[in-house]
Image (tube, coloured by chain):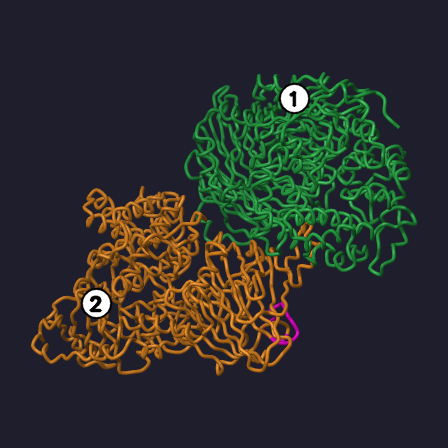
Chain colours: A green, B orange
Amino acid sequence: MMLAKAFLSATVVVSLSATVVAQNNGSELLRYVKPTTGTARMGHVFPGATVPFGMVQLSPDTDTIPYEVNGRYNPDVYKYCAGYQYEDKTIVGFSHTHFSGTGHSDLGDLLVMPTVGTLQLNPGVASDPKTGFRSTYSHDNEEASPAYYKVKLDDHNILAELTATNRVGVHRYTFPKSDQSHIILDLMHGIYNYNEKNVWTFVRVVNDTLVTGYRQTHGWARTRTVYFAMTFSKPFKSYGSKNFDEKQAYRGFWGRFDQSRNFPDLAAKKLRMHFDFDTKEGEQVMLKMAISSVSQEGALMNLRTETPGWSFENIQQQGRDLWAKELNKVVIDADDNETKENFYTAMYHAALSPTTYMDVDGRYRGLDQEIHTAKGFTNYTTFSLWDTYRALHPLFNILQPKRNGDMVQSMLVHYDQSVLKMLPIWSHYANDNWCMIGYHAVTVIADAAMKGVPGFDANKALDACIATANRRDFDGIGYYIDKGYVPEDKSGSSVSKTLEYAFDDWTIAQLAKKLGRMDVYETFMKRSENYKNVYDASIGYMRPKLNDGSFRKEFDVLSTHGQGFIEGNAWNYSLYVPHQPKELISMMGGDKKFVAHLDSLFTMHLPDEFFAGTEDITRDGIIGNYVHGNEPSHHVAYLYNYAGKPWKTQERTRMILKKQYHSGPAGLGGNDDCGQMSAWYIFSALGFYPVAPGSTYYDITSPAVSKAVINLDNGKKFEIETIGQSDKNVYISKILLNGKPYNSWQLNHADIMNGGKITYYLSAKHGK
Amino acid sequence: MMLAKAFLSATVVVSLSATVVAQNNGSELLRYVKPTTGTARMGHVFPGATVPFGMVQLSPDTDTIPYEVNGRYNPDVYKYCAGYQYEDKTIVGFSHTHFSGTGHSDLGDLLVMPTVGTLQLNPGVASDPKTGFRSTYSHDNEEASPAYYKVKLDDHNILAELTATNRVGVHRYTFPKSDQSHIILDLMHGIYNYNEKNVWTFVRVVNDTLVTGYRQTHGWARTRTVYFAMTFSKPFKSYGSKNFDEKQAYRGFWGRFDQSRNFPDLAAKKLRMHFDFDTKEGEQVMLKMAISSVSQEGALMNLRTETPGWSFENIQQQGRDLWAKELNKVVIDADDNETKENFYTAMYHAALSPTTYMDVDGRYRGLDQEIHTAKGFTNYTTFSLWDTYRALHPLFNILQPKRNGDMVQSMLVHYDQSVLKMLPIWSHYANDNWCMIGYHAVTVIADAAMKGVPGFDANKALDACIATANRRDFDGIGYYIDKGYVPEDKSGSSVSKTLEYAFDDWTIAQLAKKLGRMDVYETFMKRSENYKNVYDASIGYMRPKLNDGSFRKEFDVLSTHGQGFIEGNAWNYSLYVPHQPKELISMMGGDKKFVAHLDSLFTMHLPDEFFAGTEDITRDGIIGNYVHGNEPSHHVAYLYNYAGKPWKTQERTRMILKKQYHSGPAGLGGNDDCGQMSAWYIFSALGFYPVAPGSTYYDITSPAVSKAVINLDNGKKFEIETIGQSDKNVYISKILLNGKPYNSWQLNHADIMNGGKITYYLSAKHGK
């Protein structure tokens, strides 16, 4: 323990940060947020306008790539998980719902596009934008900041500006002079579209400024309905629609109406609409689009409640204020601008998901497709839990426990509405999409409960955790319970599942213990050791085991495909025992052997072919054989702490921060994964990380910031100060906690939440 | 006026009927109802179980004919408007919603079929029933009576019995001994099905006796959703489903579940399910299926409120009591059993539509697809108004004014929810299907208001009538307003439209006058004379006029196709001026010429080819050139009253009653049209008919009953007595009203509603 040496200099620390914070409300932090960071390549974030955790996330979509071509999966679709690709030269319009950083997709509802000239109701193709309503644009004429997005649509000579409230997207279009100005509402558009995705659309043109309706889809969310209410600042002079459903077999007696022109009562599978205006040079037409999962009336209520007027600036300012408040929760200082941009862009990306999922009156459509009311909490959706249980929800437990308590409560009502009696796996919009593995909602719940987060009934939550972990017909759980592992010949990715179930089980056990339910504790502690059942001591790796109890013969410890793992290989995944690292190290041969394994991960050189098919990351998302762009290794750099080499944790995390996060469109090495990658950045940059959520400790590393103040919701502040911070001084020589020498590599949650200060003395030299 | 002769014998009349009524509650009338009457050929009624105006109308469907074959309309589908054809040898199952007597179709939701043996999830074909779950059956083993239907399913050796409450279908299946007993729930089945009709289906198996979900379709109702909650009297031992959507492009990550076996969370476009049981010999398994337009919760509430227990007999008895009450509103006596069967079967068919359309708490899905609450009224749907404005709604104004007031209120909330600002044309299930012509809701409203029916705001109703009649883009109304007629080259069936608009306008004028809105009265009285604009005096017929003001040159007064008329030819339709028969007679050349025209209608012989393509009737529905099976002539026989030949009205209506209505499956000559044909029977058999709804008078004819008592809701009784009734004594020699000589061929509504007695003296001889 090298910390013991340097107790004496504690008193030299001065508190500058607190003074800085007192002078502002966070608005000066907005400029560090770069929403375009990660919009190129595989970051899969969107540059558009939204408020923190907003239901509406209004953003440009740059193409209309179908999920399927000629009945086969179209791999190009993957680029458009968030609708926008920085490299693209055209914009097809602005849609109101987006995922941030996912590796599979959906949404893109209610695309709006202003145009001028001959009406075109097809988007056209990127290679020849004049074939449709899409427009070329230039990044020179584009601006993205929190709650604001602006772009010049060159082909139409229209300036488009976007802002948003929680449930309303607000558009302001500055038109040229024209008697053929149009605003197109594309109700077919969507992300990950295939031919049968649009299930139904219903539209009512209530009057010459108000349109309501809904769009119902079958996609990643199997049964999803988005209601809307859209209003214009200026009455349209005419409107129309086209039904693109070439297979429509039955039209009944609706043919007596000309439904294509000025007809207010529309319903079909595939509709595009247009609203026509005369505009003067420089005339601004605004549009507000509210959404709801409940009803058109709900959308209209959201519209009227959140955006009563027509001041774009006021709405934008409200959004910026919300963001300032969010960013101000951690006020950092850093020597270089890029660290600030990385940090606050991460803070921004870490506040995009989960998304609000209820109307202003608390009503929402539940998993059972029935209308429910959230009583006493804000209901959220977009739970990418395989990603976010690791660091994003733990981050919320520090920065916004109230919100995370509501997220837990949202998962519990999901459970109540689940006919399978399961907590969410990957849920969005009244659906579980069942993406990825594990039952990590239990970890989010246990972590929140262990950290005293309010807002839910912990005993009821434990019951939901137990029921989920005992759903025998889900993903090998029955085998796992009976045999202590998931057999690879019964359920693929079997080792990943076994390891993650074991960790999740440990978190259930922790919660049970806290609640005094010792029988549950015993059962799940026993299950939490199941990782041992897939460890093959003869080779020193976790290895897929068959139903007959033998390890699978064919096995490649480097390949990421078909080896019993998902988004990782055995080399990485064998380290996935976050709850019992000491036991893992011992099982793997002790500190020395373990450190060598860790080192090899970061230093080995592997040919590209090993990563050719790795999901959700670019080649840059990989360091040696360490895959930071995917999540299973996120705790790995911290394991040195348990093997007697904390300086290597410090060195590695500082190195990863530098290598994996950059400002600029190509700045993210892989999917941001609904904020998990960003949460890793925030924790690691601040000098601690939740290796085992469900515990109350964090593992300490070397901060990348020079100082930081965490403004806690409870009114207290936790300060992080570094002495000697530099790019070279990545090693911790000493730590003081509240001025006293601190002799552990684990920081307690209570020490943060009680307020205080941690001081890191940094050096260019490390211990042994 | 031949009545004046015979004042003196008034006092011989004795009141027997009142005594009869006092002895019973109507239950003895149930035996005269033959639900199978009209189930053969084109009656298009269903034999299944329902309560009066029930939301659930649970009935066997005898085939699964698609609306389309190879992309073309399949004319065979027409036979199955009500799902059942008496001639068929197999039953595919029992579905919960049906139209009664329509000529176009929809519904057939939630088909349930019990089977034994190897599971089959396809219905199979009628020519080889063993190819599917359908079963042969025999009419010998079939029984249909109010609120009860029974049939033996021979192929499965299962006795099926059905009964119903308003919102719940109740099934009782008596199984043989088997460990392979199944109950199939076919969520794809429907009436007028085509490949894209099923839009979406969602199902939750809540536990081993309860299943909830919804089915959403796009058909005659463009956007329709039926929620359900289904419960079994015995837990199923297993269950499963099959998704028949061969085009399903996207399955997401649901593949990790085996959704075909015991999986409770289902959603797809095309689902069939099965529930499996072990049954002992003779074991009865019951099933209750509740529906709702609101939600699964709404269906469950309906289920629990209306059918709390499992006594089939109790539920059936409740239903029979409701029917007895309904039938008891008119207690007749007649010399022959067939007249009683015809009369009470007509009373039954006249109480099947409109259907209740709200949950037990008053909530329902409105035309805007939003959830509304019916406050202070029962909400109804299934408004086949082109048919039912003539006699069915007028009948309701006598027999159940409260219900008809609610029906008017239902049309007014439809109007409120209509973004087109129109009253219903032909509406069902939160949709207008726009079938047929005119805007006859205005007549129903005016008739109810003129007759003092309570339950709606007459001024508001008038506003709705005016708005509807001024919807210029609907069906030639703009031309009609501007030119005084609908030009045939602008809108087909132009003469029928002009004539019907003119009549509807007259009813609007009557309502306006009653409300003292004389400007409206003047405007619509002027419009009501527009029939004159399509009368071609040179030929003595109504004739299609072109936009340039000239009559169309090519014209065939007998053909029913392409001549400017719908469901009728010029010979019949030229008589359609119900509001101004005297002016019509004058316009057509006076009494003598007019009577000759009327006579020719009934006596001319026309070759079959003239009727080959006539809609909705069989050859039997025609007498000479008089088409009783369609509605435009329903008032025609009464027009003799206005041309000085009332005895011919008497002769003709008695003849029509005999020729057009019979007991037995083939007893109806054409579609019953949601009760309009039956209402004609009831009125005419009682001796009076509403030639011009919107007025307060009825035209008198010779009753076919020997006596009748109308038990009015206001507690009063109106008695009809005949002196000298026989098949030959069809002519009225004298009428007494309340014992006093009655010297008019019109009977006033008030005279009925105030209670009293009308006595008809009948004779075999007629006047001149």
Disc number for residue A336: none
- Magenta stretch: dominant SS? loop
B522 on left or right of A88:
left
Q: Quadrant of residue A88?
A: top right
Q: Crowding near pointer 1: few (<14 within 10 Å), some, many (20+)?
A: many
Residue A427 image point, x, y percent = 63, 46
Front position among marks 1 and 2: 1
Residue B593, position in %: x, y? 22, 63
Where is residue A585 drawn, in percent x and y?
85, 42
Pointers 1 and 2 in contact (C-beta within 8 Å): no
Q: Residues within 10 Å of mark 2 (few under 14, many from 20)?
A: few
Q: Which mark is residue B715?
A: 2
The one nearer the camera, B443 or A63, is A63
Disc 2 marks a residue whose amino acid type is Gly
x 43%, y 71%: residue:
B49
**A599 relative position to B484: left or right:** right
Front one among A579 and B200:
A579
Q: Position of residue A514 (x, y in %)?
A: 65, 46
